[in-house]
Image: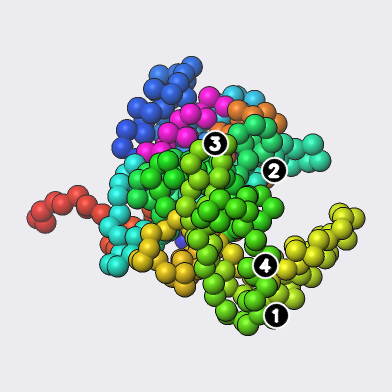
Amino acid sequence: MIDINGCDEDWDLLLSFFPAGWEELARSTNAVKGLRQDKAVANCLRVLLLHVGSGLSLRETVVRARAAKLADLSDVALLKRLRKSQDWLCELCRALFAERGGFPKPDGAPSFRLLDATEVKEPGQTGSLWRIHYSLSWPRLVCDYFKVTPYQGKGTGESLLQFPLAPGDFALADRGYSHAAGIHSANRQGAFLTVRLNPDGIRLQTPTGAAFPLVEKLRPLQRTGQLAVWKVQIPYEGEPPVAARLCVIRKTKAAIALAQTKLRRKAYKQKSELQPETLAYAEYVMVLTTFPEPEFPPARVLECYRLRWQVELVFKRFKQIAQLGHVPKHDSVSAKAWLYGKLFVALLTEKLIEEARALSPWGFDDPTVSSAA
C-alpha cells in the first residue's frame, strides 16, 4: 500500500490563509529573535501551532517536531519561544480582523455587535484565572475584537469600557454590563446599546429626575407575554444623564418557576436571605436600550436582544472544539501567548469554513497552469 503523507501540502494550503506579512510580523515583534538564520520562520510557527492548536504538552510537542524534522529543541526552549511569541500571535489575530474590513448591513437592519466575556483557568487548584473580552459581529458571526485580561484586578471586569465602540455601532450585552460608567462611555462614543437590566447594579431615574419605582411599575404586568416600556434616565457622577427606554416582557410560568428555583438554590448554597423584589424581578426580562425610535419599537428591541445568545454559542465552541477551557501555563506571559494562539487557531478556522463554501474540487485555488504536450 502506498503511504501518502499530505502534511506538507496541507501546510502550504494553510499558509495561503495566513494574513499578509505574517513573517514580517514575527520579526517586528521580536518573536524570532535569537532564531538561527538557517531556521525557517514557518517552522517556528508550525511548532507553536502544534503545541497550541493540538493541545499537546511541551514535551510531546518537541518529540513530534523532532520526528517531523521541523525543529530540534527542548521543552524549556519551546516555552521560551512561546513567551517571545505573545505579541506575534496577538498581531496575527489583529491582522485577520483587519482583512475582513467592513461588512454590508442586511436590508432594513443594522449589523450588531454582541459583547460578552468568558473565563479560562490554568489547571490545578492554584491555577490563575483569565478573562477573554469578545465582540461578535452579527449576522456574519465573526469576531471583530478581543482582549485578554487577568480575572481579578482594577480594570479587568466585565464592562463596556473594555470595548472600542464606534459611532453608529449597535451593541448587545448581558446583565454583567449593566453599569452606568459603561453605558455613559458607549453614549459618548456615539454607539447605541441594548443591555439586560441588573436592578442591583444600576440606578434609574424618571425623566424628571426622581427615583424610578421599578417594583411598582412591574406589578400590573401579570399576563404571560405582556409588554411594557418606560422612558428612564441613567445618572453617573455629575455627567448629564443618558436617556434610555426600559423594555419589559413577562416570562412564561415555566420560565418564571425555573428562574426562581435557581435563585432559591443559589441563596441556599450561599446561606443568604433572598429578597422578595429579587423573586419579583425574575418574573420578567428587562432590557435598557438607547436604540433609536421609531425604528426600534419595544418588541423589536427584545427580539434583537435574543441575538446575544450567539456569542454564548461561540464560547461553547471555543471550549469544546478549540479546547479553550483551561490555560496550561504557569506565568502570565506564556498564558497570554497560549490564549492568543488558541484564538488565532479559532479565527483561522472561521476563515477556512468561510472559504470552504466555494473551495474547488481539487482542494485549492489558483492552480499552476501548464500546457499539455
Q: CA distance from mark 1 to mark 4?
A: 23 Å
Amino acid beneath label 2: Lys
- The residue pinned by badge 4 equals 216
Question: How packed is label 4: few (under 14 Cα within 10 Å), some, or many (20 or more)?
Answer: few
Relative image position of residue 187 (x, y in whole percent): 44, 45
Q: CA distance from mark 3 to mark 2?
A: 39 Å
Q: How is the image coloured?
A: rainbow
Relative image position of residue 190 (x, y in whole percent): 38, 45
Question: How packed is label 1: few (under 14 Cα within 10 Å), some, or many (20 or more)?
Answer: few
Magenta range is: 83-95
Q: Earlier in the sequence, mark 1 or mark 2?
A: 2
**Nearest to the observer: residue 307 or residue 44:** 307
Kindly indicate whether the residue at mark 2 contacts the one at mark 1 (C-beta within 8 angstroms): no
Mark 1, secondary structure of its residue:
helix
Q: Is residue 251 magenta?
A: no
Q: Earlier in the sequence, mark 1 or mark 4?
A: 4
The reply, left or right, for residue 296 in relation to residue 346 is left
Q: Earlier in the sequence, mark 2 or mark 4?
A: 2
Amino acid beneath label 3: Gly
Q: Main secondary structure of the magenta part?
A: helix
- Residue 345 visible in image: no
Question: Which dot marks residue 121?
Answer: 2
**Nearest to the observer: residue 274 or residue 73:** 274
Q: CA distance from mark 3 to mark 4?
A: 27 Å
Image quarter in which the C terminus is found? bottom left
Q: CA distance from mark 1 to mark 2?
A: 34 Å
Amino acid beneath label 1: Ala
Mark 3, secondary structure of its residue:
loop
- The residue pinned by badge 3 equals 238
The reply, left or right, for residue 72 in relation to residue 100 is right
Mark 4, secondary structure of its residue:
helix
Mark 2, secondary structure of its residue:
strand
